Image: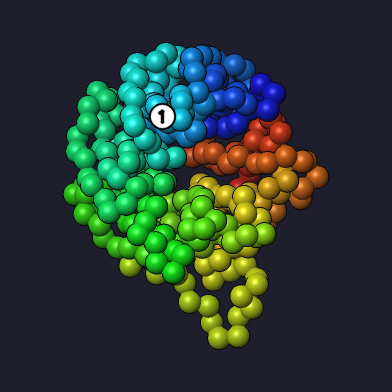
Amino acid sequence: MPPHSHALVGSSDGSLIVSSPNGKTVTRIDAATGQVLSTQDLGRGGALSAVEIDRSVWIVQQARPDAPRLLQLDARTLAIRRVREYDSVAEGIAAADGHVWLGTGHILTEIDPVSGRTIDRFPLLGGINLVAGDADSSLVFVTLEGPVRKDRSPLLEIDGSTGDVLASARAGYADLGGVSHLVPAPNGVWVGEPTGMMGTLGFYATDGLMGLVPPRGFDEGKDGHGVIHGANSITGAYAAGYLWVAYGEGTVTCADARTGRKLGTLTDGSISGSADIVTVSGRPMTVIDSTLFVIDEQLACS
């Protein structure tokens, strides 16, 4: 892989899309061999996040502080098909209910993944910070800048087929930037919440976005029962039936996708560098210090 690459998104064809350190170039790599298959210069700005759907890769790019862009690329050649400029674009882009979902200001925008046509626009009560979706369902999860209550920001569960808000909760700490990460999983979503020196991933169930209630006497400092502790930069990804957690400094673990109970450790921190976790053809993979590791989930989670 190119030095200091950042993994953007995995593809269903066995390839991986990575960006250069400045985000101005994206490269498609064969995940099995490491061979570079195609490269595309994005011209300006940095690639923030991406999603692959219907043979297209959609990239949110911060071209300039006042002119973010949405790019549609051919998933095989990385040729640029469409470019759209917006006044503001939320970090994060989602695929759910067969469509692309993007936060622009206080508007959740639904886009046809083939034609690029805007299908619908759903106004929300506050500016959108993060968008995440479950490609296997119609659920879209969104965090907002406000209204803030008791230093907590809104988290919304939205039905992508109708645009209706199904449930809402309070998550993240507004004075610390709010929610940092969203990981859709079966029956809920894992939410990254920086707390200052440390951070957590917490599970919010789709039946009302309620957190799991630990049993009496459970040590709140331990992982499990819907909470995983780590650094402020803790992130995760759902793949192959498990939750994969990156703690920073090269440590990746396998956990139960509902409770967060640790099942195994993939790396022990001996390989330094932040870890990106992606799904390629349904398999979890991690990129640490520009090195791609294919995860054997049976061994990692046993």
In x, y percent, where is residue 124? 26, 50
Towards the viewer: 89 or 157: 89
Instruction: Look at 19% across and 49% down and name the residue there.
Output: 162
Q: Is residue 30 above or below residue 188?
A: above
Q: Is residue 75 above or below residue 98?
A: above
Towards the viewer: 16 or 118: 118
Instruction: Look at 40% across and 40% down and name the residue there.
Output: 90
Residue to which mark 1 is pinned: 66
Q: Residue furthest right?
A: 270
The kind of residue tagged 1 is Asp
Towards the viewer: 197 or 211: 197
In x, y percent, where is residue 4? 68, 28
In x, y percent, where is residue 242? 53, 53
Q: Is residue 230 visible?
A: no
**Quadrant of the drawing holding the C terminus:** bottom right
**Quadrant of the drawing holding the N terminus:** top right
State the image quarter where residue 51 is shown. Answer: top left
